[in-house]
Image (cartoon, rainbow, N blue to C red):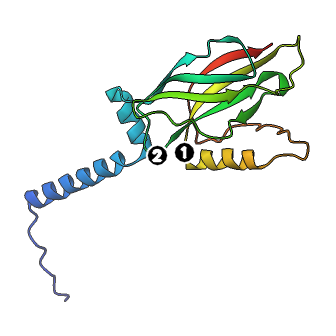
Amino acid sequence: MVAQTPHPPFHKSTAFVALITAIITLVSTMASQPLWGDLRDRLTGNEPGIEFSSPEPGPVPHEITLTGKLRNQPDDKILWFVTLDFDDGNVYHPSDRPCIPAQDGNFRCPYWIGDKNHPAGTVKHFRIIAILADDATRYAFAEYNNDILKDGKRLGMKELPKTKEELDHIDVQRV
């Protein structure tokens, strides 16, 4: 005959403490995850956003200044502008550097639309996209900007990195 080992008595308080500990661990883990942070920001009205002051949608010259205000910029992301060229196969051209807003969120960044040798009398359609770039997106944009073809032109990116966060855009035309 096998001797049976007595089990310790089950205490409801022990189970309750274990349950509370599991809930606290789960909530603290969720709070540190990006998805939870995004949901928390949306629920509290603290999600990132952007308001453009200029340019207005419509015709623009080659050299412009993007101005506006960025709200609630996450510490781990940076503002970057990308041009989508509708007339050249829907390719993306990231700016050569990020746009760094002032501490109050206001930004004023020089920007170039299309080729400076744009033929007079022709119209090209572009979209300027404001993006919050994480590390992977910044790396992809830096790689793109370092990869200049022999004739000095870039072919454009067929798609943007999956980890980017698009905030808003402005549609413009070069005339």
Residue flagged by tag 2: what amino acid is it? Asp
In the picture, residue 54 is in which quadrant? Answer: top right
Q: Please tell me which residue lies in front, 168 or 29.
A: 168
The residue at the point 46 percent across, 46 percent down is 76
The secondary structure type at the circle numbered 1 is loop
Above or below residue 125? Residue 98 is: below
Above or below residue 93? Residue 7 is: below
Mark 1 to mark 2: distance in Å? 6 Å
Neighbour tally class for label 1: few under 14, some 14-19, many 20 plus, Cα within 10 Å = some
Above or below residue 123? Residue 134 is: below
* CB-based contact (under 8 Å), mark 1 and mark 2: yes
Residue flagged by tag 1: what amino acid is it? Asp
Name the side, left or right, on which 33 lies relative to 123. Answer: left
Counting from the top left corner in percent of width and height, residue 166 is at 57, 30
Q: Which residue was labeled with disc 1?
A: 134
Q: Please tell me which residue lies in front, 93 or 118.
A: 118
Q: Mark on residue 76?
A: 2
Counting from the top left corner in percent of width and height, residue 37 is at 39, 40
